Image (cartoon, rainbow, N blue to C red):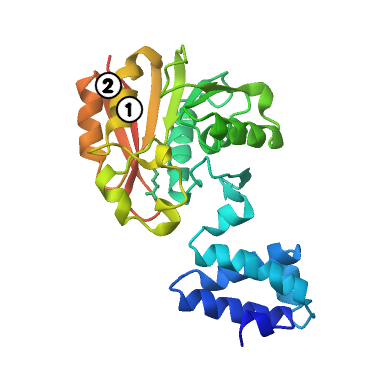
Amino acid sequence: MTLDAARTIAAARKALTDTLRGAGIYSADADAKLLIAAALDIGRTELMAHGDRAITPEQVKAIDALAQRRLAREPVSRILGHKEFWSLPLDVSEAVLVPRPETETIVEAALDFVVRGGLRLEVLRVLDIGTGSGALILALLKELEQARGIATDISAAALAVAGINAERLGLTDRVTFIECNIADGAAGPFDLIVSNPPYIVHAEIATLDPEVRNFDPMLALDGGSDGLDAYRAIAKDARRLLAPGGRLVVELGAGQGPAVSTLFSDVGLKVSGIRDDLAGIPRALIAMAAS
Ligand code: GLN
């Protein structure tokens, strides 16, 4: 049955799942549930519990409008306008990278440093370079109740999204947003610096999934001809910005550990560890000022 002909929630679910799967979308089943629940403005539990409930032609139209966007490879999180990160609900817009699960590795590595150092209740000064939706800084400020944060982004539109997220999470009084390149507008020193910089090799952008290449902002992806431009800029500023004993934790693209380690060592930083993500890929590089 096609979606047009569907007269119940269950029929619409089956039709949309089949259509998405037929288009080569692996997450067809989950996507269909999320999109139909959004179109009908009901929760997923309700959706599952009331498969036999009738839907109107207008509701079918509403589902179809969302389905067309997904078929054009727009990610579900962008269609819905939000994405969960570190169990926090975050708004996303076309101006920000959709936060990825692997970026939670940066939060874990940063918290690991804080907890091991017995610094959890200190008034830590935290900097997030290229904050986008605010995912990293907001997750850290949620966990570290005394910490204060500065978050930069070159995109005013991204900072607007981060600001909305900070407000929703009740964190506006502990975070300041600065519109600037890398950390040009930040004075420091900081006890903790985190960043998920753009790190895709320019020539490889065309090979990424359409969900990424057509919908994530280029500013958040493009790392220049070798993918390392942003790390170079961060390295240049790191000594100035890091407090004694502080840590810099950056996300890595696959295979970038050795090159970023070398870049950082060259400016007098000491790489103290690399943490894998859940897929076993080295993802968070931790560095400190060499004494
Ligand atoms: N994680 C993104 C991707 O590969 C890239 C994000 C980035 O460049 N920081 O899809």
Separation of marks 2 and 1 at Cα, in angstroms: 6 Å
Marker disc for residue 269: 2
SS for callout 1: strand
Relative placement, left or right, of 29 versus 49 is left
Q: Amino acid at mark 1?
A: Ala
Q: Is residue 286 left or right of residue 264?
A: right
Q: Quadrant of the N terminus?
A: bottom right
Query: Do labels 2 and 1 touch, CB within 8 Å?
Result: yes
The image position of residue 29, as x and y in percent, is 56, 73
Nearer to the camera, 200 or 146: 200
- Say few, some or many: other residues with alpha carbon within 10 Å of mark 2 (under 14 / 14 to 19 / 20 or more): many
Who's the residue at 25% across and 26% down the image?
A: 264
Amino acid type, callout 2: Leu
Q: In the rendered image, which quarter is residue 18 located in?
A: bottom right
User: Few, some or many C-alpha atoms within 10 Å of disc 1 (few <14, some 14-19, many ≥20)?
Assistant: many
Position of residue 163 measured from the top left corner of the image (x, y, whole percent): 63, 31
**In-image side of 175 versus 220 (left or right):** right
In the rendered image, the residue lying farthest to the bottom is: 1
Say if residue 140 shows up in the picture.
no
The answer as to whether callout 1 falls within 8 Å of ligand 1 is no
Residue 21 in percent (x, y) is at 48, 76
Identify the residue shown where x is 50% and y is 32%.
Answer: 131
Rendered residue at 28%/14% (across/down): 291
Residue 232: image quadrant is top left
Query: Which of the two labelled residues, at mark 2 and mark 1, occupies the earlier sequence position?
Result: 2
Q: 281 above or below 31?
A: above
Identified at 24% across, 19% down, the residue is: 267
Q: Which residue is disc 1 drawn over?
A: 287
How many labels sit on residues?
A: 2
Seen in the picture, residue 250 relative to 34 is either above or below; the reply is above
